[in-house]
């Protein structure tokens, strides 16, 4: 929400982060998660959002070097990984 709507109003960002924080706190208080689970989940969410914006924001640019760079997750029964590709 912050990346998409920060220029329209800071209120969207504040409300989105507040809702996410309250959800995490309530999950901890109801013994559904531990604090490290919530913190790691928040970190993964923020990191993946920033990584997505860094890599996919350039798909519509004229810079061919950035257009040919791809990052995406790969899942199978035996492994989980992140794939980095550069198309020459």
Image (cartoon, grey):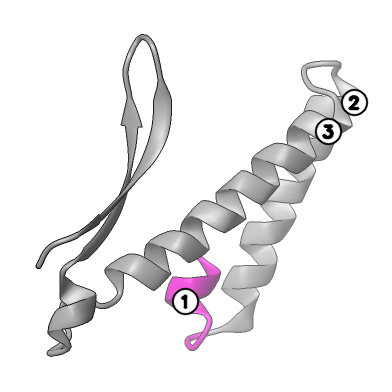
Residue under label 1, please give it: 5
Residue under the image location 62 percent in, 81 percent down: 10
Residue under label 3, please give it: 36
Label 1: state its secondary structure. Answer: helix
Instruction: Give 41 or 19, whichever is nearer the viewer.
Output: 41
Q: How many marks?
A: 3
**Is 6 contained in the magenta span?**
yes
User: What whole-number distance in Å separates the C-alpha atoms at marks 2 and 3?
Assistant: 13 Å
How packed is label 1: few (under 14 Cα within 10 Å), some, or many (20 or more)?
few
How packed is label 3: few (under 14 Cα within 10 Å), some, or many (20 or more)?
few
Q: Position of residue 42 (x, y in %)?
A: 68, 46
User: Which of labels 1 and 3 is toward the front?
Assistant: 3
Compare marks 2 and 3 and give the one earlier in the sequence: 2
Query: Is 10 left, or right, of 79 in this rendering?
Result: right
Q: Which residues are magenta?
A: 1-8
Residue under label 2, please give it: 29
Q: In which quarter of the view is residue 81 placed?
A: top left
Compare marks 1 and 2 and give the one earlier in the sequence: 1
Q: Position of residue 63 (x, y in %)?
A: 17, 88
């Amino acid at each position: 929400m912050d990346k998409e709507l920060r220029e329209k109003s800071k209120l969207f960002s504040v409300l989105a982060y507040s809702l996410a924080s309250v959800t995490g706190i309530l999950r901890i208080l109801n013994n559904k998660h531990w604090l490290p689970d919530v913190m790691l989940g928040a970190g993964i969410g923020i990191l993946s959002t920033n990584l997505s914006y860094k890599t996919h924001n350039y798909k519509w640019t004229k810079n061919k070097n950035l257009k040919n760079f791809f990052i995406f997750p790969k899942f199978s029964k035996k492994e989980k990984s992140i794939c980095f590709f550069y198309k020459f």
